[in-house]
Amino acid sequence: MSDTNLPGVTGVIAEEEQTGANPRILTLNMGPQHPSTHGVLRLQLELDGETIVKCQPDIGYLHTGIEKEFEVKNYQQAVTLTDRIDYLAPLSNNLCYCLAVEKLLGLEIPPLAQWTRVMLTELTRLNSHLVWLGTHAIDIGAMSVFLYCFREREDILRIFEMYSGQRMMTSYFRIGGLALEPPRGWQQRVRTFIDAFPGKVDEYEELLTNNRIWIGRTRGVGCMSMEDMLDLGVTGPMLRAAGLKWDIRKSQPYSSYDQFDFEVPTRTEGDVYARYQVRIEEMRQSARIVKQALEGMPGGRWTADAPHVVLPDREKMKTQMEALIYHFKIVTEGFRVPAGEVYQAIESPRGEVGYYVVSDGTAQAYRVHVRGPSFANLQATPCMVTGTLIADVIASIGSMDFVLGDCDR
Amino acid sequence: MLPETLKEHATAAAVEAFDAAAVVSGKFDRGELTLEIARDKIVSVCGFLKYDLGFVRLSTVTGVDRYPAEPRFEVVYHLHSLDRNERLRIKCRLPGDDPQIDSVTEVWRGANWFERETFDLFGVRFRNHPDLRRIMLPEDWEGHPLRKDYSVTGSRV
């Protein structure tokens, strides 16, 4: 067997010969340092020739105990933890966590803050989908798409940097509104980008949509039925590519998404190519939402009228005693949140992100559970790849668009 | 027993009509319905919720540690019905000296990893689970980090 000359494969075969296992079956470890597993995912594959007979994902390499950390930070500090969960969609996680805590507090967020939040989470969706498209294409062998995607991604990161001073871990949303008033000139910056963006999506499509190699590698690959996906908890673009028109932004609107006009793209094939089409269309829809937010941006305050939660203006602190007291209280011990529990779900680029926050009435959360969409989606890997060829595994798992930080937390 | 205020709620009333003994309590707070179910009845109630009431999606399963109060553990299930566009929280309380509950993997296959995670981080055992192993931490790890008596700081000896 020439295969035995491959490094790393020899030992496995020798072991199996000793244990008397089926000699036709070859066990192969993919990851945890495989480039196409985007992080540290390990797949234990059992192969019969080139066909996968069993697949066992092994996760947890990136487990950092974030849920435990939530219990020792006060509510406002914990916003920074949510960035690090899903590093490609930090603002989606910021938003979901803030909405959950605001629900516990019963805060009313002013329209201006809500619309800005919508605009920034949609830019985050673009950012995440661009990284997905670039890396997914590079996995399958299309190098240039990666360069195109990262060109636009850089523009988005610059916009984030302008807003928050940070490119990736923005932590820009605060409980009760936004951290800062955006700087002068941001509207023009966002407008220039978003006006040009649909043309850029055309460029990606020109490279891929009718590309024969791309179609050959993705069409009819990694199929999964809608029933299997629902049963396994898969959400997001994968589910929509299998035909279910379900998007939390439409079905249970949050942060005034009900005031925006956009479509929820679906396909029925449920293969890798359909997922590609759905995400491409989602990018166009997100650009529409950003544009609407820019044009119809309401006026008003950046933060809720809740002095016990939101830090006071610097000016007020110099002239008003109450503002100084509130500032001292919020900074030193944080604010107390009424006892109770809430589950808030939003539509992140990967699917349903859910935050389950339990409060016992103190300034720190009693328990925070994060439902990461990557965790639930990855669970479906064995169902998706068993019985297919090993060469298609890369395309299949690439189409899931998981982030291991989101999965392992 | 359902509180009087929840008798009008369609989902809560349907679950009580299905098995009145299973419903320990219920509450409706901040627009979210929570039903506490007796732990022996969890699989039958979940089966009813999925197949008769259309809660086809299990969003997540997790735990809460109420240490030092008893019963110590809560296992929390978040369900979602696409047809009714409704979410539901199911809760079971487990005593600290015997944290065991039947697995709902036979109702939703997707419960598999969520229950493994709850086992790993809280030490709650799920009976009849097809593959109850640690998922986040190494196999030889000692203790369950999300328990309240597991220290955040300091080193393990």
Image: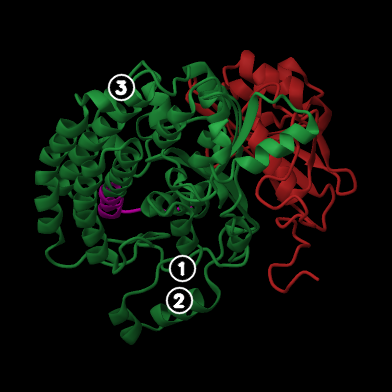
Chain colours: A green, B red
What are the residue bounds of the magenta stretch? A106-120
Q: Is residue A368 above or below residue A396?
A: below
Subunit of mark 2? A
Give the amino acid type for the residue marked by disc 3 in the picture: Gly
- Which element is circle 3 on? helix
Contact (Cβ within 8 Å) of mark 2 with mark 1: yes
Front-lying residue, A210 or A264:
A210
Percent of width and height locating residue A326: 45, 76
**Residue in the image at 44% along x and 29% along y:** A391
Earlier sequence position, callout 1 versus callout 3: 3
Give the amino acid type for the residue marked by disc 2 in the picture: Tyr
Query: For the residues tagged 3 and 2, is the chain the same?
Result: yes
Q: Which residue is mark 3?
A: A216
* Mark 2 → mark 1, Cα distance in angstroms: 6 Å
- Which element is circle 1 on? loop
Q: Quadrant of residue A253?
A: top left
Q: Is residue B51 above or below residue A59?
A: above
Front-lying residue, A198 or A333:
A198
B52 sits left or right of A353 in the view: right
* Mark 1 → mark 3, Cα distance in angstroms: 59 Å
Q: Which residue is mark 1?
A: A308
Q: Which residue is mark 2?
A: A326
Q: Quadrant of residue A1?
A: top right
Q: Is residue A107 magenta?
A: yes
